[in-house]
Image: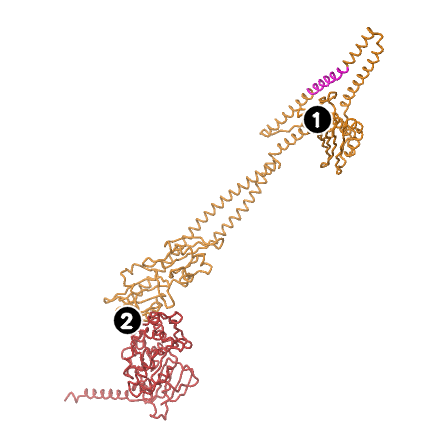
Chain colours: A orange, B red
Amino acid sequence: MTFRTRLLLVFTVAVVASVALVEWLVTDSTRQAFERMETQRVNGLVAQFRKEFAERGQRIVRAVDGIAASEAAINIAIAADDSPYYNEAASLAAAHGLGLLELVAGDGTIVSSAEWPARFGYREDWLREPADWESRGAFLRREELPDGVTLALVAVGTASAGGRQLYVAGGQQLDREFLSSLVLPEGMRVLLYRNLEPEFSPAELVGGRAEDVPRVQPLIEQVQQRKRAIARTLGSGAGAETFHALPLTGYQGDLLGVLLIASSRRELVELESVLRRTGMVVAVAGILLGMALSWWATARITRPVQRLAESAARVAAGDWGATVASSSAGEIGQLARAFNRMTHELVAQRERLVQAERVAAWRELARRLAHELKNPLFPLQITVENMQRARERYPEQFDEVFREGAATLLAELANLKQIVARFSDFARMPAPEMQPVNFNELAIDTLKLFEPQLAQARVRADAALDPRLRPVQADPEQMTRVLRNLILNAIDAMPEGGTLTVRTSALEGGVRLEVSDTGQGLTPEESRRLFTPYYTTKAHGTGLGLAIVQSVVSDHHGRISVESSPGKGATFRIELG
Amino acid sequence: MRLMSSPWFAVRNLALAALAATAAAATRPHYGGTLHVQIRQSFETPDPPTAGYGMPDLARAFAITLWEAGRRAVYAADENAAGGRPFLDTVEIEMARPLRDQSVDLELAKTDVVELGPSELRRQPAGRKVWASAPVRLVALVFAPRVEDARIREALALAVDRAAIHNVLLQRQGEVSAALLPQWLSGYAFLFPAAADAARARTLVAGLPAAVRAISLGVEDAAARPIAERIALNARDAGLAVSVVPQAAGADARLVEVRISSLDPALALAGMAVSLGLPEPPRAASPEALYAAERALLEGFHVIPLFHLPDAYGVNPRVKGRPGITPLGEWRFENLWVEGGRP
């Protein structure tokens, strides 16, 4: 992954994270603001509903008071026989808009009942309890009807005349009709749970839908337990509703019902959805813009770095004169200028190093030449001095000495020529002429050349050649010289005989050539210095053979290595391609 | 003397004579005129009824001239009636009139004779002429044969608070009774206990399953529905679940009304037994035998007598003559006449 890609990735992640954070913060704060507004709205609506509910109660109180103050009620109160009035409640209730009305004599006996006409003569003793009915207003009460028990909002009035009293207990059933008659704001609905059974009964949920029952049951049960108002949001998405569950108690404080005021959250959810969509669009646009800016910024930031990297690559490739144009005054500019200074310094150092190496090479060459030439020169000098001494002191033996001295001189001169030829060969290493070379054939041919020499040295030759090997671009002459040097080196390493193994194996687009011996092996120090020119472990070596091998391999852009340990032979490994 | 022979005295005598003549003319029967009668019942038959009470009684002295089933009937005086021609020319009967509307029409003098229910009877102004029969209509509960458990029947009989119904719904009209024949006819009706005993009723049905304790009570007459509703309420106190239904057919029990058809107690009991679907009692020669026969009929509580009610009619003051109904409630309009009729 390039620096630019990484930088772009970092910028992108930073932009996305920042935008997401901002988006979340804005959305969350907006949502909370809307939630507060929604809460205020719902509270307002609930207050409005409570007012409406209270107004209904007041209306009932007014109607009951109106009946209690009517002439009809007075007449009933003072009548010696109230039986003729057993049907009066129905007409009075109808006239005053009440669904329930009972006219009860002072002794608690029902004179007339609108909701249950047959109940005349029965008793309503609760009315005779000491209570200030006039100031109590409307309250909730369980009412028995022919078809069951119901919950009603009732008020009690009294008509008194001539020392006699008539209770007027009237009200409205809290049923579906009552709920539907309430003026409700848009998006609000009202459910009523009549707490008339010991356990939760779905049949007592008035005004709700079948699917409301499992949703509101836990809420109702909580209100039944705590006997206080609870607000909960039930459902999810646009179908969610905020329920305000209000306990409805009777005049004795007993929980008679739970009023559920449900406010739809659809509007809020839709508003939040719009906000979320808008936020998403803005966020995506922000991210895209941020990514574009990041791309531009990373391009601007990484261009000098890229140039710097290219220059460094050129330097690594050998172009030590590579420089970077620097116009920036920042860190990148400083880096570029430092790079330029570094490359200038490297060039200068390299030139100094080359010079020093040259000097060192010449010194080493001179030292080796002096060393190599000194050895033959000493016998030459001795031989010539012997010949001179014999000529002067022993003329009769001079011929014999001369013949022997001449032979020695020739032998040492031949030795000198060989030394000079080797140095000449090392100096005259030409550039390789590449052509496809089959290294298996090359190995077989080279081993054939050494058959007599191998036999003489009691060395057995093995060829482990990879049949999959394909021709590889190489200079056959130079590679033959390489293999020859390695075979000679191996023979020299096995003075007591042994096994020479030449092994080829195919590489991806190349070849591996290995020459192994079973000789004494090399120490780690020897292995490290083995390819140094003029380094040799042999008594009569020039130290140029492996140096020539390394030079050829290097000219073929290959690698040479040695693997050895003392007493276990050595393996020279060449990889080309 | 001077005074007695004075002109003033002569004038006074003339005036008194004129008043006496006018009074005599007013109380003297007149021929002619139409008697307008309204009834609650509606006869939907193609021909006028010939049996029963009310309209069929007119056949004694009148002949039907117009029949509009369920709406109106006009009877014309029979010139050859056995008892002589009636004073009235025609009797026009309007059917299917609610009791309340009848009272209003009477109040507005739009009609001459109307039926009076308990509430209407109570509301009649002072001085209103009212014809009332003896308590001749028996209101009773009749169980269907499928209500086999006598405890249920007895419990319902014990649960009904007849006194409250009599006092309020019936406005003390008629009399509470647990006997088939009224006290005025049999003389022993008081021997049949009519008091409610809800505690005993509860004990009777305490061990019975709810399905057995559920009873449907059929009431076809809307005017009788309040009585049925009150019975249902009383039954509830006793542990019975009585539901009032408008169809008598198929109900477990019915609230019915039957009339006494004879002044002879034995005949009346026999007629009533037939009407109520009870076995015909043996002919009783003595009050004791009659009592035993009636007790036997009521054994098992298949029929629970509740009240004996009279027939009551409000009458327009222009209708003259003796009451137009007999103690049994039969119509006797042939001796009536109306003011403004043909002299």
Query: Magenta residues?
Result: A356-376
Q: Nearer the viewer, residue A195 or A232?
A: A195
Give residue A520's mark.
1
* Label 1 – label 2 distance at C-alpha: 143 Å
Residue type, numbered disc 1: Gln
Q: Quadrant of residue A73?
A: bottom left
Instruction: Give the chain letter at badge 2.
Output: A
Q: Which residue extends farthest top?
A: A393
- Please check whether the numbered discs 1 and 2 fall on a single chain: yes
Residue A432 drawn at (x, y percent): 77, 29
Mark earlier in primary sequence (1, 2): 2
Q: Quadrant of residue B262?
A: bottom left
Q: Nearer the viewer, residue A368 or B43?
A: A368
Circle 1 SS class? loop
Q: Is A415 left or right of A327, judged from the image as shown?
A: right
Instruction: Give the chain letter at badge 1.
Output: A
Residue A386 drawn at (x, y percent): 80, 10
Residue B317 visible to an observer of this rendering: no
Q: Nearer the viewer, residue B92 or A310?
A: A310
Instruction: For the residues labelled 1 and 2, say whether their Cβ atoms are less than 8 Å apart.
Output: no
Q: Is A480 left or right of B310, judged from the image as shown?
A: right
Residue A374 drawn at (x, y percent): 75, 15
Residue type, numbered disc 2: Asp
From the viewer's perspective, is residue A190 above or below residue B217?
above
Circle 2 SS class? loop
From the viewer's perspective, is residue B135 above or below residue A77?
below
Name the residue that disc number 2 marks. A82
Q: Quadrant of the C terminus of chain A?
A: top right
What is the crowding at mark 1: few (fewer than 14 residues within 10 Å), some, or many (at least 20)? some
What is the crowding at mark 2: few (fewer than 14 residues within 10 Å), some, or many (at least 20)? some
